[in-house]
Amino acid sequence: MKTAVKMFTYVKRFYKAIALTVMSAIICIAFIYAKRVYSQAGFGKTFGNKAIAAEKQLNAMQDQFELCKNICNVDVKFMQSIVFPEVMRYNSIKDGVEAESLRLLYVQFGTAYANFSIGLFQMKPGFAEQVEMKSKQLLPESMYNELQLAYESTDLQTIRQQRVERLQDKDWQMVYLTAFIALCNQIYKSENFSSSTEKLQWYATVYNAGFDRTNAYINKKIAQDNFYLAQQMPGKKFRYAAIAGWFFNK
């Protein structure tokens, strides 16, 4: 009798283990499939109306892009593609609430206390600070003066206040994007990009991840899901560079 009980217990455990293995395999396959679906180039179908709305907003700024492209020596589509993922994510109501609630902290205490995305291109004050500083250091004086990034005031709080006001203006965001691309042209002038798409994805990744990153870090980020598109997709990340590349080649 005891032997029968042992055999029954053993069989029960055996089938339970098989069931768990099968279940784990199904979950794993489902995860891999979902990842492949969201990583495919068919972003237009995946994002639907968000992509259409973002493209409309960028096209509405065609004149500004045309004006700025010659300064940073790239074409309009290249410029638009860098910020396309951010324009898809942009929400004017949410952006306004964030700006009003966090700008006071930033103006008073700086990026250590508040460094929030703002405006159509979702730029952060910390990003703008880096662009301003590096532009003065690395860009030709004539270009730096043309971009008008300097401030008349020397008071830090006044400068931070003006910086936030700049970032709430589309024309100023174009200035910062233009300066950013010109800086990338200078910083990565020795890089041998195999194609315009590879160059675009590199610049887009730097835009998303920030300056002062190693080449190894940028390469890792290009292949990594690291970008939250919307609140409706909690926990789901996308490859920023892949979305930018899709729009560039669209």
Image: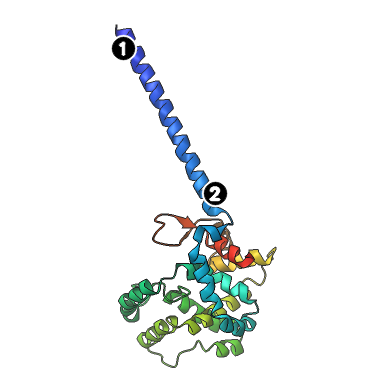
Is residue 56 placed above or below 242 in the rendered structure? below
Residue that appears at 43% across and 74% down? 124
The spot of residue 243 in percent (x, y) is 55, 62
Snapshot quadrant of residue 245: bottom right
Q: Quick one: 44 or 126, which is closer to the camera?
A: 44
Count neighbours of disc 1 (C-alpha within 10 A) and say few if under 14, some if 14 to 19, many if 20 or more.
few
Is residue 84 placed above or below 22 in the rendered structure? below
Q: Amino acid at mark 1?
A: Val
Residue that appears at 40% across and 81% down? 164
Toward the top, the furthest residue is 1
The spot of residue 122 in percent (x, y) is 45, 73
Residue on which the image places disc 2 = 36
Image coloring type = rainbow
Counting labels gives 2
Count neighbours of disc 2 (C-alpha within 10 A) and say few if under 14, some if 14 to 19, many if 20 or more.
few
Q: In this view of the protein, can residue 218 be seen by the observer?
A: no
Determine which of the numbered discs, if any, sits on residue 104 in the image: none
Q: Quick one: 11 or 183, which is closer to the camera?
A: 11
Q: In this view of the protein, can residue 107 be seen by the observer?
A: yes
The spot of residue 242 in percent (x, y) is 57, 60
Q: Amino acid at mark 2?
A: Arg
**N-terminal of the two: label 1 or label 2?**
1
Q: Where, quadrant-wise, is the N terminus in this rendering?
A: top left
Toward the bottom, the furthest residue is 152
Query: Contact, CB < 8 Å: mark 1 with mark 2?
Result: no
Snapshot quadrant of residue 215: bottom right
Q: Where, quadrant-wise, is the C terminus in this rendering?
A: bottom right
Is residue 134 placed above or below 230 in the rendered structure? below
Q: Is residue 105 left or right of residue 215?
A: left
Label 2 element class: helix
C-alpha distance separating marks 1 and 2 = 47 Å
Residue on which the image places disc 1 = 5
